Image (spheres, rainbow, N blue to C red):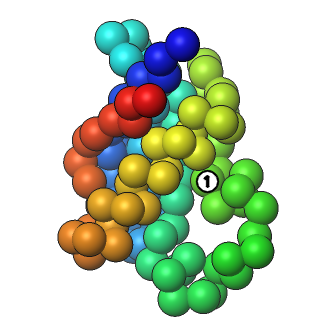
Amino acid sequence: MAICIEFRLIEVNATIARYQYGQCMKELDGTFEVDIPKLISGEISKDTPMDEVVRLLPSKYMNQSMANRAFSKIYKYYLENKGYPSEGGYYA
């Protein structure tokens, strides 16, 4: 079974980015926040549970596993480009 997740940046406030996410070809109706600079700097411990690193926000669709997969792509992009991607996807 293929996994296809898309995400889109809503806003960045200071170092916190808010993203919409969802299944490919469908409405992006989930929302989460991440703060990668604080994670990289160690202000957020690498031992912090993923549900605290990738914080789901109340929305129509809430799926921690999908949000975590989107985060993995966002994190890799951030490390390479020193900024949040405006959109992207996770495909497996």
Q: Quadrant of residue 8?
A: top left
Specify few, some or many for label 1: CA neighbours under 10 Å numbering under 14, 14-19, or 20 or more: many
Name which residue lies at 28% across and 39% down: 88
Res. 62 in view? yes
Q: In this view, does 85 lie above or below 68?
A: below
Look at the image and tell me in which quarter the C terminus lies.
top left
Q: In this view, does 84 lie above or below 24?
A: below
Q: In this view, does 88 lie above or below 83?
A: above
Res. 5 in view? no
- Residue 58 horizontal/vertical position (percent): 66, 34
Name which residue lies at 30% across and 60% down: 77
Look at the image and tell me in which quarter the N terminus lies.
top right
Which amino acid lies under the numbered mark 1 shown in the image of this protein? Val
The residue beneath circle 1 is 54
Q: In this view, does 38 lie to the left or right of 62?
A: left
Name which residue lies at 50% across and 81% down: 40
Q: How many marks?
A: 1
Closest to the observer: 27 or 24?
24
Q: In which quarter of the image is residue 7?
A: top left
- Residue 48 horizontal/vertical position (percent): 75, 70
Name which residue lies at 40% across and 36% down: 90
- Residue 61 horizontal/vertical position (percent): 61, 21
Closest to the observer: 78 or 20?
78
- Residue 46 horizontal/vertical position (percent): 68, 77
Closest to the observer: 13 or 71?
71
SS assignment at label 1: loop
Q: In this view, does 86 lie above or below 76?
A: above
